[in-house]
Each structure stands twice: as structure tokens, then as C-alpha cells.
Image (cartoon, rainbow, N blue to C red):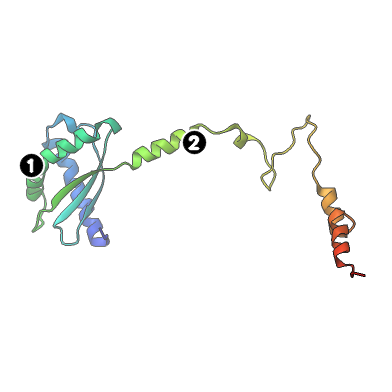
Amino acid sequence: MKQNSLTRRLSAQLREKLGYILLFEIADPRLDLVTLTGVEVAQDRSFARIFVSCDGDRYEEVLEALDAARGRIRSLLASALDWRVTPELEFRIDRSTDEAERIARALENVPETLSVPKDEEGYPLAADGDDAPVADDAADEGDEAGDGPSGAASAAEEAPDA
């Protein structure tokens, strides 16, 4: 839904009232440890999409409990809000926390190659005691002067055919 400053303010107001209703008015044990993560209200206030978060293994149970309590929640909202229209409610599970957990677990398993010190070009630096291969800096300097292998090849290419 398109959000502007008015709908964001209405969403914040609806989220506050919904939080109070879910915490104190609805006595369903299936709704324990449910978090409201977001609310979107249509511009005409006729529809609201509510995003909730809970444990990953309880998604279906929580959605069933919210669907069962939808009418009661809506009637409590009608008395709590001073809006002319009480919005239709649609509950959705917010899976962004699951994605954040998956990324956090992936970041805990850092490969050993990421901890190896690297130069500014991203190549691993040689350890102090290792016999690492010498960089090709000398060959590169020779190429610039024109007397390296590639310099000789380019000189041969520039020679006129006899």
C-alpha cells in the first residue's frame, strides 16, 4: 500500500491500539510471544494489513488464532479508535526476522581465507617465514621499458614486413 505521512501516522495509532488489545484484551494462549512488526493502513482507512512475528514453528497456529479472533479484535478497535470506519484486518507473518537469523548464522561461519591478511589488490600477503613466490614487479617494469618478453613481441609487430 502506498504510504504517506497521514497513513504512517494512522498506522502508528492502529499499531498502538492493536498492541494493547493483543496484550490485555485477547486471552488466547496461542498468541503469547507474538510481536507486531508493522501495520499498513489504506488511505481511506477501510483496510489494514498487520505484520506479526513469532517462532518459526508456530506460524500456522498464530495465523489461525488471529483469524479466529479477528472479529473480536475489530470490535475492540472500533471502540478504541475514533475513526468513522473500522478497517478490515488482514494478518500476515513477517518473515524478515527469519531471514536475519539465517544471515547471522551464515556470518558466524566465516571461512579461514577471509582472515588471511591481503594487500590492497586482494592477494594474500606472504607470511614472514614462508618461501612465497616473488611478485612479478620486475617483469612488469621490464615490460614498460620495452625490453621484456611482451616488449619484444610488440617491437616485432611494429617492424615493417620485408
> In the figure, 88 relative to 107: above or below?
below
Q: Secondary structure at mark 1?
A: helix
The residue identified by callout 2 is 107
Q: Residues within 10 Å of mark 1 (few under 14, many from 20)?
A: some
> In the figure, 51 relative to 142: above or below?
above
Viewer-proximal residue, 5 or 123? 123
Mark sitting on residue 72: 1
> In the figure, 69 relative to 11: above or below?
above
* Residue ID at (24%, 35%): 59
Viewer-proximal residue, 34 or 122? 122
Q: Classify residue 148 by image quadrant.
A: bottom right
**Residue 117 image position (x, y, % from top left):** 67, 38
Mark sitting on residue 110: none
The single residue placed furthest to the front in the displayed view is 162
**Residue 133 image position (x, y, % from top left):** 79, 38
**Residue 96 image position (x, y, % from top left):** 34, 42
**Residue 32 image position (x, y, % from top left):** 20, 31
Q: Amino acid at mark 2?
A: Leu
Along the horizontal axis of the image, is 39 left or right of 72? Answer: right
| Pair 1/2: label in front | 2
* Residue ID at (10%, 53%): 86
The single residue placed furthest to the right in the displayed view is 162
Q: Secondary structure at mark 2?
A: helix
